[in-house]
Amino acid sequence: MALRRLPLADRLAFLCRFTLREEMASVSKAAAAAAVRQGRLEALPLTGLGRTGVRLLQRYIDRPGRNVTRLHVAAVLGCYSAPWALDEKSAQRVVNWMGSLRQWLNSRRLW
């Protein structure tokens, strides 16, 4: 489907304009779930920084590429997550990201 090649924000704008209100919840949930599986940060406005957002950030870190940059982004965004919206496992992930980033910065004498 050609719609899937569009950026998530454009896809959601298109769907808001041309789909029924009743369909929007299921379509946006499906789009958010797919983006979480792929670790795409563009879905953060849909997921928020709760458990689903932390899961998305973890997938983002796990993608191949510049892991330190990814870790930095996740650690900074994780600091802004709402503590009441996280379960214990998600909260521990955020603490681990911050610790890993601190260790990396210390190893390069940047902290």
Image (cartoon, rainbow, N blue to C red):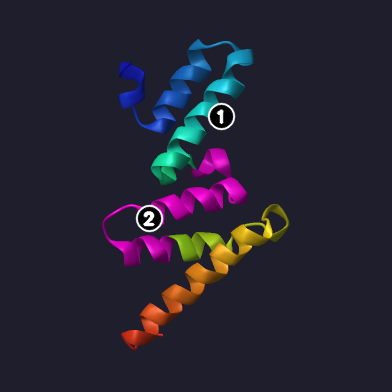
Label 2: element kind: helix
The kind of residue tagged 1 is Lys
- Judge whether residue 74 is colored magenta: no
- Judge whether residue 70 is colored magenta: yes
Judging depth in this view, the residue of 96 and 80 nearest the camera is: 96
Question: Where's residue 6, x and y in %?
Answer: 33, 26
| As drawn, 59 above or below 78 | above
Residue ranking furthest to the bottom: 109
Q: List the residue tagged with mark 2.
A: 62
Q: Residue at x 73, y 57 (%)?
A: 84
Q: Residue at x 61, y 50 (%)?
A: 51
The kind of residue tagged 2 is Asp
Q: Residue at x 46, y 24 (%)?
A: 13
Question: Where's residue 95, x and y in %?
Answer: 56, 70
Give the extent of the magenta segment.
Answer: 44-73
Magenta span: predominant SS is helix
